[in-house]
Image: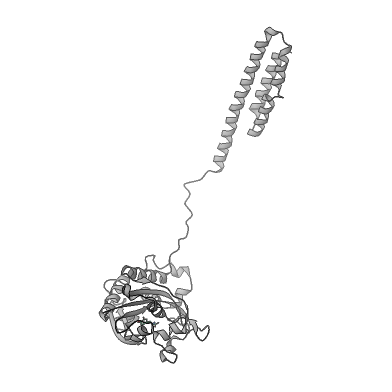
Amino acid sequence: MSLKDDLKDIRDQGLDDINKSTDLKSLNNIRVHLLGKKGPITSALRGIKELPVEKRPEVGSYANEIRDDLTKAIVEQRDNLANAQLNKRLAAEKIDVSLPGRSVPQGQPHVIQQIIDEVVDLFLGMGYQVLTGPEVETDHYNFEMMNLPKDHPARDMQDTFYITNEILMRTQTSPMQARTLEKHDFSKGPLKMISPGIVYRRDTDDPTHSHQFHQVEGLVIDKHITMADLKGTLLTMAHQIFGDKFNVRLRPSYFPFTEPSVEVDITCFNCMGKGCDVCKHTGWIEVLGAGMVHPNVLNMAGVDSKQYGGFAFGLGPDRFAMLKYGVDDIRDFYLDDVRFLNQFSKRGI
Ligand code: DAH
């Protein structure tokens, strides 16, 4: 056999191997074997020097031709295999975009939080600060600074959980009045704040009482604040939270930290003032307590009650929610049953 025949065999065998290769790794092995330094072409070329001089160029160029053929075939096969591999992966990773999406359940603020947010938004818009205070409170702030000394009979209505004789779970957000009054610098302007938060009472649980509920305290102190300012503020809130058709009514009442004190009623949502079972035929529903801040509260906190005065109020978002949605058991709000909670729209009341 001539060297040319050897080369031809190498090519035929090589092309066969290349075309039969099924993956890039074995194709690369074939390439290294065929075209490498120890491969058949290189060793065949070594035999050229045995040939007569005039034959050498022809065989040499034939060997180059074969190397080019094989290289070309390898490149082609490499493309084929790479494409096949890609197509296989694409098929495996195919996404059916026509499938309906998996919906992610969307949460929403608790109905009571919705009401608190709405109250906070309103008062922020009227330039009030929003402050929060400790739920574990001292007797000093919770009672004494709110004009409820140790032996005061009104303490009975607000029995709570004691941690020590002097430290307790706060029964009201009113202590935030004293805490804020102590800190406020009146040379910088009037004090206007609301303070939302959780309060505690040692109430036996029944449909209208829970041992834990919410309040939003409000306090405005400046020179020349009158009860008309209080009523205007409460009317604005009633309009915002319940709607423009609602009116407010102030009734004389008693709180140790306000003088005079009032209970605030709004138009009955059920009969819009005509009188029905819900409002016990009065046309009104009691929604919060308020009054003009007692001079003792101001003086104890270091504010001169001869110069400064104002109003305070305390509202219960739980009660607002019960009224607005006709929920007759406050405990429903605390059971965290999503079937119950999902009934309340995101936009609040
Ligand atoms: N702290 C009172 C309570 O829990 C509610 C209250 C009434 C707050 C009158 C006030 C107010 O600021 O002026 O029963």
Whether residue 282 can be seen here: no
Report the residue at 61% width, 21% height from top. Answer: 68
Q: Quarter of the image containing the C terminus? A: bottom left
Give the total number of marks visible in the rendering: 0
The quadrant where residue 183 appears: bottom left
Instruction: Report whether 170 appears left or right of 19.
Output: left
Ligand 1 is in which quadrant of the figure? bottom left
Report the residue at 68% width, 9% height from top. Answer: 55
Instruction: Report whether 169 appears left or right of 120.
Output: right
Q: Position of residue 148 (x, y in %)?
A: 41, 88
Q: Position of residue 258 (x, y in %)?
A: 34, 85
Toward the viewer: 171 or 136? 136
Q: Position of residue 205 (x, y in %)?
A: 47, 82
**Can you say whether 124 is above or below 10 in the image?**
below
Toward the viewer: 345 or 76? 76
Q: Position of residue 286 (x, y in %)?
A: 33, 81
Whether residue 85 can be seen here: yes
Q: Quarter of the image containing the N terminus? A: top right
Toward the viewer: 14 or 41? 41
Toward the viewer: 184 or 66? 184
**Can you say whether 40 is above or below 113 in the image?**
above
The quadrant where residue 4 appears: top right
Instruction: Report whether 293 appears left or right of 200.
Output: left
**Can you say whether 149 is above or below 181 in the image?**
below
Q: How is the image coloured?
A: one colour
Instruction: Report whether 185 appears left or right of 340.
Output: left
